[in-house]
Image: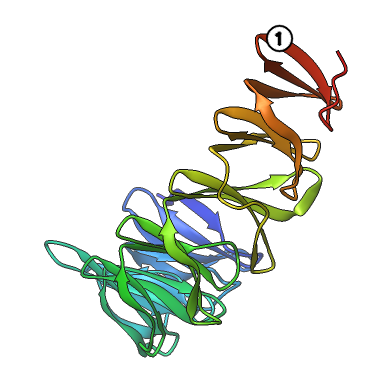
Amino acid sequence: MKKKLKFRHLNEEFAIAHDRENEKYGLYNKNTKTLEIPLIYNYLDADLEKSQLLTAENADGFYGYLNLNNEVIISFQYEHATNFRNGLAYITRFTDENAYEGVINEKGDLMLPMEYEKLYIQHPYNYAIVQKKGKYGIITLDEQVILPLEMDHIETFGYDQLFECTQNQKIGIYEVKSGKFIIPLELDRIDESFIVDTKPRYEYYIFIKNELQALVKYQNGIITFLTDYIYDHIDHIGMSENRVMVMMNDLWGATDVDGKLIIPCQYDWIHHMGNGKIKAKKNGREYILDLNGTVLE
């Protein structure tokens, strides 16, 4: 009886074939309608746009790498492995307590040993965020230290060589290019980025320090403070028509998207209505304002 196979597209020529009855995988050639790699693997995957090597798991539960002719290029020796990207792949070993990651190249050379609890390579710069013994740092692929493993957490900030670092519940921004913190480890929180409709090329953030907030612009790797840490709250959810609602000393006003105060903080509450109008309340009376704070009604 002919096997019923499920196929997953890789490119115009190849697909991963899945024998669901026996839970085995192979490589199917869509042009010749034949199996280039037989249905013998526990797992098989590839990203052929990034690499011509396929990640495979053999019957013994070990991972290795094959070429399209089913020739073993990197032997089956890893407890887990990922597809290659930009010439590098993650490999993993497991203990009873944890999983430890490392990195190899397409020749099977070990670039980073399997001793990191977390590991994330920053392409195309060839350095990595790593975690070891609970602490984070940044290293090169030859294990040169860029930022010592002293942080409680590290994640990327924006799309350039900037990193949001946390230590002792304080946050700062580290720049690899300059080798220093361009924002000291003194922030309480960074609110997620958002984009203003009038300036879609910019990303905006709200930095919080000592319970006060500042409006910050980020573009092309450059962080610009549009306001100082002076506001109790900045309402980026309501940003529209070049206005940002801000609160100071429990009273509301509005800035433009460059941080300039347009409507003084003198209202009990303020709400953007759209169509060039803002609704506000002061001393028990409600007002309709234009975008410059002039009372319309």
Residue depicted at 20% across the width and 70% down the height: 133
Instruction: Give the residue type that dot 1 points to.
Output: Arg
Q: How many marks?
A: 1
- Vertical position of residue 206 compared to residue 31: above or below: above
Q: Is 59 or 135 nearer to us in this picture?
A: 135
User: What colour scheme was applied to this rendering of the protein?
Assistant: rainbow
Horizontal relation, residue 248 to residue 44: left or right: right
- Vertical position of residue 291 compared to residue 24: above or below: above
Looking at the rendered image, the quarter that the C terminus falls into is: top right
Residue depicted at 85% across the width and 20% down the height: 295
Figure quadrant of residue 239: top right
The image shows residue 205 at horizontal and vertical percentages of: 60, 51
Horizontal relation, residue 222 to residue 87: left or right: right
- Badge 1 marks a residue whose secondary structure is strand
Mark 1 residue crowding within 10 angstroms, few (<14) / some (14–19) / many (20+): few
Horizontal relation, residue 84 to residue 270: left or right: left
Q: Looking at the image, can residue 239 be seen?
A: no
Horizontal relation, residue 194 to residue 166: left or right: right
Q: Is 162 or 49 nearer to us in this picture?
A: 162
Figure quadrant of residue 211: top left
Figure quadrant of residue 283: top right
The image shows residue 1 at horizontal and vertical percentages of: 40, 49
Residue designated by label 1:
285
The image shows residue 144 at horizontal and vertical percentages of: 37, 89
Residue depicted at 54% across the width and 82% down the height: 178
- Vertical position of residue 90 compared to residue 22: above or below: below
The image shows residue 286 at horizontal and vertical percentages of: 73, 11
Task: State the residue lying farthest toward the left.
Answer: 96
Q: Looking at the image, can residue 236 be seen?
A: yes
- Vertical position of residue 253 compared to residue 139: above or below: above
Q: Is 26 or 281 nearer to us in this picture?
A: 281
